[in-house]
Image (cartoon, rainbow, N blue to C red):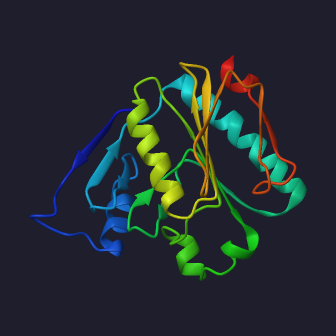
């Protein structure tokens, strides 16, 4: 996914409500915003990445329906992180008790909460450095577990609070550990 960063800060500083309205007024464009309040315009994914994203997301939804432990979100959901960034991971999950602390208005707009779990599936046009920086930002902002799936190089980077990044080559499955109890992602849907 190609991304373009635009710095409008010398012209205008968008409030949270203005950024939300910008996104609503332009639904065909996927925006994010970094901690420096620069706009990031994301290109749409291609068919292969989109197919894999929905398959991965379905696995999370099925697990979550069975366990009823939290709330799943797709790549269209934008979260307001503690550092001020607005980010949209490919798949994310929040423990129910944490989600319930938000007001209905906060839940409907860009939730001001870091997910407990996030997954990023690299697109062919993504650079590893940019994806790793984004993962570090998630972990630095209270995400407890993150998976960066690099399909091109058949590897996964696992990010955890307070630990070094674990890199695994060609894994067949990933465990949700204590963040997603009992969840196992079979990676055949990614490597195919």
Residue 7: give x, y in percent of width and height: 18, 54
Q: Is residue 62 visible?
A: yes
Q: Position of residue 13 (x, y in %)?
A: 20, 69
**Residue 78: in sight, yes or no?**
no
Residue at 70 percent of width and 34 percent of height: 55
Judged left or right of residue 158, residue 80 is: left
Q: Is residue 51 above or below residue 16?
A: above
Q: Residue at x 44, y 39 (%)?
A: 131
Q: Quadrant of residue 114?
A: bottom right
Name which residue lies at 77% across and 49% down: 61
Query: Residue 106, percent across and down?
Result: 53, 77
Q: In the image shown, does 132 or 14 lie closer to the viewer? A: 132
Question: Is 113 displayed left or right of 64 in the figure?
Answer: left
**The N terminus appears in which quarter of the rendering?**
top left
Check the picture and name the quadrant holding the C terminus.
Answer: top right
Q: Nearer the viewer, residue 39 or 81?
A: 81
Quadrant location of residue 33?
A: bottom left
* Residue for point 48% across, 26% down: 46
């Amino acid at each position: 996914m190609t991304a373009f960063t635009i710095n409008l800060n010398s012209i205008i500083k968008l409030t949270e409500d203005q950024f939300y309205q910008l996104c609503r007024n332009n639904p065909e464009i996927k925006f994010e915003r970094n901690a420096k309040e620069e706009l990031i315009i994301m290109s749409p994914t291609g068919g292969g990445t989109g197919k894999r994203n929905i398959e991965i997301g379905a696995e999370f939804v099925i697990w979550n329906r069975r366990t009823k432990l939290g709330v799943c979100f797709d790549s269209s959901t934008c979260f307001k992180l503690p550092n001020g960034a607005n980010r949209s991971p490919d798949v994310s999950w929040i423990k129910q008790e944490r989600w319930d602390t938000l007001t209905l208005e906060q839940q409907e707009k860009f939730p001001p909460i870091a997910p407990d779990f996030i997954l990023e599936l690299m697109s062919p046009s993504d650079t590893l450095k940019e994806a790793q920086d984004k993962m570090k930002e998630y972990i630095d902002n209270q995400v407890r577990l993150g998976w960066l799936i690099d399909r091109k190089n058949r590897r996964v980077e696992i990010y955890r609070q307070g630990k070094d990044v674990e890199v695994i080559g060609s894994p067949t499955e990933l465990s949700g550990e204590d963040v997603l109890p009992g969840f196992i992602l079979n990676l055949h849907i990614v490597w195919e």
